[in-house]
Image: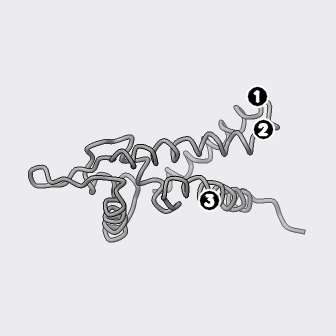
Amino acid sequence: MYQKTLSFYIAMMYRNFSSFTSKKLQEAGLNFGLLFFIIYIGKHPGCSPSQLRESLSLDWGHSQRSISQLADKGFITKEKEGRHYVLNLTERGKNAFSIAHQVFFDWDESVLQTFTEEEKNQLFLLLEKAAKEITKEK
């Protein structure tokens, strides 16, 4: 008999969320690995690559490869302004942002459909409390 752990349930939900999201993102020509890049740039138009990298806690090489991939595929523009670059979504990127942003709500609705509003609120309060403990560790 396995022991119930938070990490087990998180891993199980992550796998399901990743699969669900990947299917939705394919409609826009994106993969799961680029999801948070599109969301960050969509919410922070005109951001620099270093701002994106720091906010998403990524290493320089990975962020540069992903930014180049998004630019090459026509999701973002990377324009030089002064001494640094700024990132913005193209029309294709805005469409991808819309899909990427909505996927969180769609997955929640799918997974939490049998929960009452009170149960949802309680779950989110407990998850928020757990998340605060994670941020303390940094």
Please state if 69 lies on the left or on the right of 106 as rendered. left
- Say what secondary structure mark 3 lies in: helix
Question: Disc number at residue 113?
Answer: 2
Residue farthest to the top, as pictured = 117
Task: Work out whether residue 118 or residue 114 is closer to the camera in this orientation and state it.
Answer: 114
Disc 3: which residue: 18
Tell me residue 134's x, y (percent): 54, 53
Q: Is residue 82 left or right of residue 90?
A: left
Q: Quadrant of the C terminus?
A: bottom left
Task: Name the one closer to the observer, 71 or 35.
Answer: 71
Report the front residue among 106 and 15.
106
Residue 34: x and y, percent? 45, 59
Cα distance, mark 2 to mark 1? 13 Å
Colouring style: one colour
Bin the neighbour count of mark 1 within 10 Å (Cα to Cα): few under 14, some 14-19, many 20 and up.
few
Residue 83 position by quadrant: bottom left
As drawn, the label of residue 118 is: 1
Residue 15 x, y percent position in the rendering = 67, 62
Q: CA distance from mark 2 to mark 3?
A: 19 Å
Q: Amino acid at mark 2?
A: Gln
Q: Quadrant of residue 124?
A: top right
Is 128 left, or right, of 57 in this rendering? right
* Label 2 crowd (10 A; few <14 / some 14-19 / many >=20): few
The residue that appears at 36% across and 44% down in the rendered structure is 91
Q: Residue at x 27, y 50 (%)?
A: 87
Q: Earlier in the sequence, mark 3 or mark 1?
A: 3
Q: Secondary structure at mark 2?
A: loop
